[in-house]
Image (tube, helix red, strand yellow):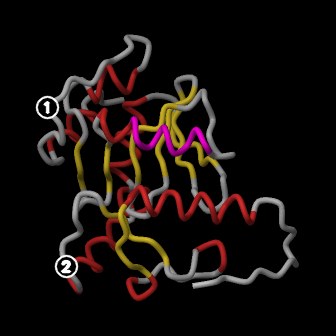
Amino acid sequence: MDKNYINKLLDISTDQISDNIFPYNNDNEVMRKLLRKKNGFFAFVGALHIFSYDEYKKIADILKKNALYDKECFYFGEDIFGNLFCEKNGKYYLLDIETGSYEFISDDLEAWAKTILDNYNYYTGYQLAYEWQKKNRKLKDNERLIPKIFFVLGGDFKIDNLYPMDRLDALNLRLDFYNKLKNLSDNDKIIIET
């Protein structure tokens, strides 16, 4: 396998988000090979967001208060919808915030970067991010696109079903939603208050 996918991803990304030093653990591949080179960045019109150290701390604090939190995972980035990329025991996953399911992506960081580059629309939501911004406005760095009708409830993956929200508020909202739905059976009815 070509060993330059991490560098290719870094080459197409924005400048680093923070100049603060990301304290890294030599055992953590993400910190050694990615965050040490760029302390947070965006790629694919902002659809891929890799956290800076300061952002990571805020995300970790929110997750620690939630049933979805897996203390063995290192949550290091998100897609346009706020689903989280994580590393656990050297393997890489995407956590779907609405369902609580972890989708396996790869066995190492190079393979993760290759998978993201090869399938950026699927793994980042690039096309919807691009179309939404073209129709509306450029997203702010702290924003994610959130479904008006959650995807797990049948909401469409279309720009008319998306609106911008502060990413931390969106994470809290969707985690709260997950916690309310996790114990329901398939035929249970729910009431959504707006």
Q: Residue at x 30, y 19 (%)?
A: 23
Residue depicted at x 48% and y 48%: 84
Quadrant containing the N terminus is top left
Q: Tell whether position 63 is magenta.
A: yes
Q: Is residue 96 magenta?
A: no
**Looking at the picture, how far across and down is residue 53, in whole percent?**
31, 32
On the image, which quarter does residue 9 sit in?
A: top left
- Decide whether the magenta segment is chiefly helix, strand or loop: helix
Residue 41 percent coordinates (x, y): 22, 44
Out of 17 and 124, give the one closest to the viewer: 17
Q: Pick whichever of labels 2 and 1 is earlier in the sequence.
A: 1
Image height check: is 58 above or below 193? above
Residue at left 45%, top 71%?
146
Disc number placed over residue 19 in the picture, else none? 1
Which amino acid lies under the numbered mark 1 shown in the image of this protein? Asp
Give SS at disc 2.
loop
Q: Quadrant of the C terminus?
A: bottom right
Residue at the (20%, 32%) spot, across then down: 38
Q: Vertical placement of 83 versus 194: above or below?
A: above
The residue where tag 2 is placed is 137
Three-letter code for the amino acid on which mark 2 is drawn = Arg
Residue 32 location in percent, x, y?
32, 19
